[in-house]
Amino acid sequence: MPNIESCSFRTVCILLGGLLCNPAYPAPLLTVDQNPLTAIYGLPLPQDARIPQAGSGAFTTSANFSSMMIIDASSEELLFMDGETHRLNLILDQGLSRDWSLRLLLPWIEHVPGFMDRPIDRFHEIFGLSAGERPTQPRDRLLYSIQRNGDQLLYVDSERSGMGDLQLILNRQLRRSDRSAWSLAGGVKAPTGDSAQLTGSGSADASVWTAGWWRLEDDMEASASAGLLFPGESDVLTRYQTNQVAFGHAGLQWQVWQPTMVKLQLDWHTRFYENMDSAFVGDVLQLSFGGAWRPSENTGLDFTLTEDIKVDASPDATFNISLRMDY
């Protein structure tokens, strides 16, 4: 069980309290790669191509709980990642005019031993999925370690937490109708986190992307996005950092009955680090499956489970709860 004083416990309380007042419904699913070595950068969350209109907006609370147990060894490198990363995103979307909107995103990040090992082991057992190295290792442990050619590049064996890097994103509506929409976005990430606590990269990032939305049927919608991230010079694994990362998502939403939807989403990005052997610092492809409850046009709630399709390239499992209130 998690410590009652921990941020993860407080996060759950905040979300449950919000649910009793006003559930929320973000689309597409607000989840990306939660690898602690990539979450420190300004990788944007997927955004709806239909931006808020002037004078309207939304406040979103999105919590991610990720668990990983990955051991990867080569002749030059030993990577050991065992633990959990929890991330609470506070997001404000504000319409500035007919065609422009602004997003502010402030994360809280913590790296902890966690409490998800047993449920994940059981999930893998029920569905016949590979458990990797999990059965051979102690449960509920925190140890992030990377060695290369005898040098210790990263070592974390105690809890770390703190405010992450602030993101500021400007959106431009290119086209919008009842059946489709396109938008263009650009973002910057300020180094408000702490690289020593693994809650930030220690540098500013910039990104640009385009997003689309289509109504395929009365009860089915699709979304997609693609873009580029330009990381600043990080304080983490500096020698191996890339200077450009491509990213994107593709999703489907199906309204099975009013007011409930089922969502399926693929997220991907290219590597953040080069000249390293481990798949955990390489290209990522992950699949998210979720449900959404939308009792009105302005409120709703998402629950999401994310699995690593490219095995050992991202956390074994990520659970997301997102609560949104439009105004």
Image (tube, helix red, strand yellow):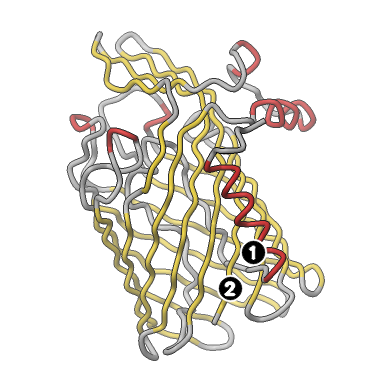
Which amino acid type is shown beneath numbered disc 2?
Met
192 shown above or below 26: above
- Considering the numbered disc 1 on the image, is that residue within a helix, a strand or a loop? helix
Pointer 1: residues within 10 angstroms few (<14), some, or many (20+)? some
Which disc number belongs to residue 18? 1
Which amino acid type is shown beneath numbered disc 1?
Gly
Q: Nearer the viewer, residue 183 or 104?
A: 104
Circles 2, 1 touching at the beta carbon (< 8 Å): yes
Name which residue lies at 39% across and 61% down. 105
- Considering the numbered disc 2 on the image, is that residue within a helix, a strand or a loop? strand
Name which residue lies at 58% across and 87% down. 178
- Place of residue 269 in the rendered image (x, y in percent of width and height, measured from the top left): 40, 47
- Place of residue 155 in the rendered image (x, y in percent of width and height, measured from the top left): 34, 20
In the image: residue 29, left or right of residue 271: right
Q: Which image quarter is the N terminus in?
A: top right
Q: Nearer the viewer, mark 2 or mark 1?
A: 1
- Place of residue 163 in the rendered image (x, y in percent of width and height, measured from the top left): 37, 48
Q: Nearer the viewer, residue 51 or 162?
A: 162
3 shown above or below 98: above
- Place of residue 4 in the rendered image (x, y in percent of width and height, measured from the top left): 61, 37
Mark 2 and mark 1 lie on one chain; the one further toward the N terminus is: 1
Measure the C-alpha gap from mark 2 to mark 1. 9 Å
Name which residue lies at 45% across and 64% down. 91
Q: Quadrant of residue 235?
A: top left
**Residue denoted by label 2:** 325
In the image: residue 53, left or right of residue 153: right
